[in-house]
Amino acid sequence: MKKIFSLLFLAIAASGCVIAPMASAVKPGTIAYFKTAQAITIENAGEDGSSRRWTKPLVNSLARELKANGARITGNAATVLKIKVTDVKQDSFYSLSTSKCSFDVKVEAGTGYTANFSVSDVSWSMQKSANALVRKAVVEILEDRGIVEYLRGKENLVKDQMDALENK
């Protein structure tokens, strides 16, 4: 009996190591409203298997939110976001009945602007905590002023207006 309990305990403890988040939608109204008609490319810049596995659902969820705001997601747009999840931490036994997940996200805009975010979540389920990380990261990304202005095309608009004035 003791051996069975030990094996069950090890199986539960190890299960947190293989959890990966799923793409999920952000609650409506969570993100500040903005519209863009830009064509946008979102690249998974994760370098290894774990980073790519955690970045993929973030890319998919971000693409879903951008589409909901009028963006066209394509593989060859001039507006590019490179996203990379790093430093993934999962603690199956954060407390007696909860699990904790956290990761860092690096977002590079095509203009050279870089934003770094750290997100974490505590839940009774490791999977729920991992999924919540994706939603929280999407919110962080789409609330960053530099990223939002880049996605709206403001730097291109200003440049085009300056070029038009110079050509008069």
Image (spheres, helix red, strand yellow):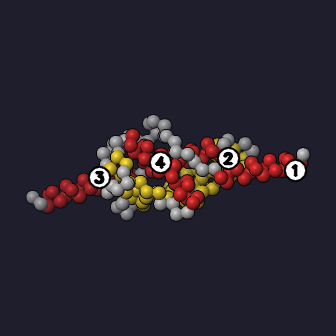
Mark sitting on residue 3: 1
Residue drawn at x 43%, y 43% as measured from the top left: 64
Q: Which residue is disc 4 drawn over?
A: 60
Q: CA distance from mark 3 to mark 1?
A: 63 Å
Amino acid at dot 2:
Ser
Q: CA distance from mark 2 to mark 4?
A: 24 Å
Q: The C terminus is located in which quarter? A: bottom left
Q: Element at badge 1?
A: helix
Q: Nearer the viewer, mark 4 or mark 3?
A: 4
81 or 114, nearer to the observer = 81
Q: CA distance from mark 4 to mark 3?
A: 24 Å
Q: Residues within 10 Å of mark 2 (few under 14, many from 20)?
A: many
CB contact under 8 Å: marks 2 and 4: no
Relative to 16, is 81 on the left or the right?
left
Relative to 138, is 34 on the left or the right?
left
Q: CA distance from mark 2 to mark 1?
A: 25 Å
Q: Which residue is disc 2 drawn over?
A: 99
52 or 86, nearer to the observer = 52
Q: Element at badge 4?
A: helix
Q: Element at badge 3?
A: helix
Q: Which residue is disc 3 drawn over?
A: 154
Amino acid at dot 4:
Asn
Q: Please give the count of numbered marks on the rendered protein.
A: 4
Residue drawn at x 76%, y 50% as measured from the top left: 11
CB contact under 8 Å: marks 4 and 3: no
- Residue 133 is situated, as x and y percent measured from the top left of the image, at 56, 48
Q: Element at badge 2?
A: strand
